[in-house]
Image (spheres, coloured by chain):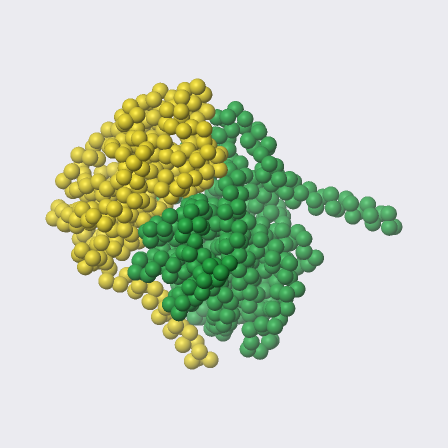
Chain colours: A yellow, B green
Amino acid sequence: MIKLKSIISKIIASSIILIMSIAYANAQLTNIIPFGPGGESDVTARLQQKYYKEMFNEDMVIQYKPGGGGAVAWQTLNSEKNDGSVIMGANLPHIIMQPMANKEKAGYTTSDLNVFNFFHYTPDAILVEASSPHKTFKDLVAFAKKNPGKLTLSGSGTYSANHLLTIQLEQKAGIKTTYVPFKGTGAANQALLGKQVEGSAGYSTIGIQLGDKARVLAIASDKRLPAFPNVPTLKELGYDIVSGAYRGYALPKSTSTATKKKLSDRLMKINADKNFIKTMEDGGYVVVNIGHDQVNKFMAEQKKINESIAKSLGLIK
Amino acid sequence: MTSLFADFLSSLSLLNVSLAFMGVLAGIIIGALPGLSATMAVAVLVPFTFSLNPSSALIVLGAVYTGAIFGGSWSAILINTPGTPSAVATTFDGYAMAKNGNGDLAMSISCMSSFVGGIVGVICLALFAPPLASISLAFGPTEYFWLAILGLTLISTLAEGDNIKSLIGACFGLFLSMIGISVVGGDMRLTGNISFLNSGIEIVSAMIGLFCIPVILDLTSLKGKHLTESDAPKSLRLVEAFSIMFKNKFESLKGSLIGTFIGILPGAGGSIASIVSYGEAKRTSKKKDNFGKGEPEGLIASETANNATVGGGFIPTLCLGIPGTPPDAVILGALLIQGIKTGDTLFTQQSDIVYTFIFGLALATIIMLPLGLVMGRYAYKFIIRVPKEILIPSIIFLTIIGSYSIQNSILNVYFMFFFGLIGWVLNRAGFKASPIVLGLVLGGIAEQGFVQAYIIGNAQDAILANFFARPISAAIIFMILIGLFYPIFKDKFFKKKELIHD
């Protein structure tokens, strides 16, 4: 009786220790993703993980701290270690729009986050279901002009990159659309493929995931993407919009500049790897190199764009 | 057919079989610990699969997933704590059976039911994936709204005890589901300026608190053992369990098919499937009055359905690239890293990988049967033999670890205890935890569906048509009406009959 008990409790204790040690063995760099597993922040961090180990012989351990569209993690960043052993994912437009839309209720301010790089972005894209009568982006705009408000576009979340794209389009193309927010890209894609909506304000990566079931009409990137050589950019079509979700990393505010530079340089080195770039591009991501020395200027530019959108939404005066 | 057979053989390599074995083993342990979810189990494993070839990687991920969903039934049966929302219905009869001294029988039946459900789900995935995927696309926001309403009307069917109190509990759950930033509109609601509440009530920690803490408090305050042991000597009660399964073969099949079919609906499947299956089993059963008091049929209905969602959930994941459940989202990410593109072409151009994966899932489900039966026996013995002084702190320890690990946050632990106290007080007053949890889970689905359907309907100038004139919606509304009014009609009808007989 006692023997059985002790054996079983030992087995349970050792299996818990085993699970813990697998997760935390040789923890060198803890990477906290402010979202759940399976999203694009997770997938791209996992792509980096492999190279981080190869290049610097250190493990990158990925943890998840989901909730509130990232806010749950961001409000706790400054209580993490500041020795460079912990980094946290930082996403645009989230970290600008959330504090702007919710004021002090968001639980953090943009300047609480010591962002030190952005390594890629997923450009926004306009997609329709494969059998849709809208063959080109022009068709879609013509439909919206003829039927104000009838162009329903599914997307992920409110005040998200997808939502902001539709606002920018309305402003630049002089049309009226109806944006239908869903919880996550999966649900938004389901509505697109099920023809519940006319189209989708999504991301370039969705075009890859959905394959030939959906047609990408336009992409809000600076140049055409290698994964979509035949899809025009919004710029080419005459709408000056470059928009998407930028992903990078942040440290606690008290972190030293040297540590900041070291981590920024390391992630930049991964960004320069040919195989890494190829995997990212095949997935529809666009690699950008915004390091610790350029990140503040970039954030300021983005803030301006987001402020003008927030004004037109009536979020700020 | 010969090529399918070849795929099957290739999935049977020694490496793959042992990977599937270890995956199921790890999955069952993780799933059985309250709070450690299938999603977490799969996510932790992903980096280890980078070094494997794509099909082995998929097999181990699928095996962990299958094991974890089954493992969730253990904590539901033994300590009345569903590990995931999909195991809520398992507590109704599973825990009642354990209370009656039939815990070992419940463990064996839940393992066999999970096996049946899992296999039916996998067969549907292998044979009917593309057509079923297109059915899932016919479900728009309107259908999700009505489906959630259907789930809510089932609360009256599920409820043990007072109907009015169940309704009040469900309304409390609906109220809780409104807290936080709304998905549509982005408004901050009912957070009382506590920034932790911005993300809403975290369902799993609330669930652990509501279900588990009252059990622990009662266990501490009352004399006597946690569960009574059955008189049957050390055995798995296999023959008994098997004969019950055999008697309920049609019910098992029905539960499996309901699970698979609802499992193909991304986002809603897992949590609704076992509830709908349980409600349906109770409605049609001859032993209706025994449900909730330890009726094996109820356990079978819930466990066949929730394991069938594993196969069902992979249908939209593989065919459409839309993850059916949260663990599917992680596996989809792993697929992309392995360079596999989802979609119809997956079944034609990369069919070898897909079928190896599907056979791997089948293999994991088959391995789960003997492994689950044997391990279940030990888990049951442990819970029943261990003295209370050890059992209580162990369970408390696990609930703390579990609720902490959801978001790596201590706030979830406080939250779990807070809900535990609420649950205990409400329990004393006769309110059960399950209607609250169902309200919390279904409230979000109903609200989002309603607002999205309204926005789309408004844009098309056809709000009413969007709600009532769509064929699938109409069918679900019809089912809701039957559920609500059938008992009333039945009473009248039977009364008349009796009069005639008199």
Q: Is residue A260 above or below residue A20?
A: above
- Can see residue B130? yes
Q: Residue at x 35, y 53 (%)?
A: B334
The spot of residue B85 in percent (x, y) is 49, 52
Say if B7 sits above or below A268 in the image: below
> Quick one: A80 or A156, which is closer to the camera?
A156
Quadrant of the drawing holding the C terminus of chain A: top left
> Does residue B172 appear in the picture of this structure?
no
Picture coordinates of residue B325, whole percent (x, y): 45, 50
Left/right of residue B492 with respect to residue B53 in the rendered view: right
Q: Nearer the viewer, residue B10 or B215?
A: B10
Residue extending furthest toward the right: B502
Count of numbered badges drawn on the protein? 0
Residue B412 screen position, x and y as percent:
38, 52
Is residue B113 positioned above or below A86 on the image? below
Residue at (36%, 59%) from the top-left corner?
B57
Nearest the viewer among A239 and B73 is A239
Q: x, y percentage for residue A207?
A: 36, 39
Picture quadrant of residue A54: bottom left
Q: Report the residue at 38% width, 21% height from top.
A: A175
What residue sits 55% from the left and 73% below the top? B236
Looking at the image, which is closer to me, A234 or B412?
A: A234
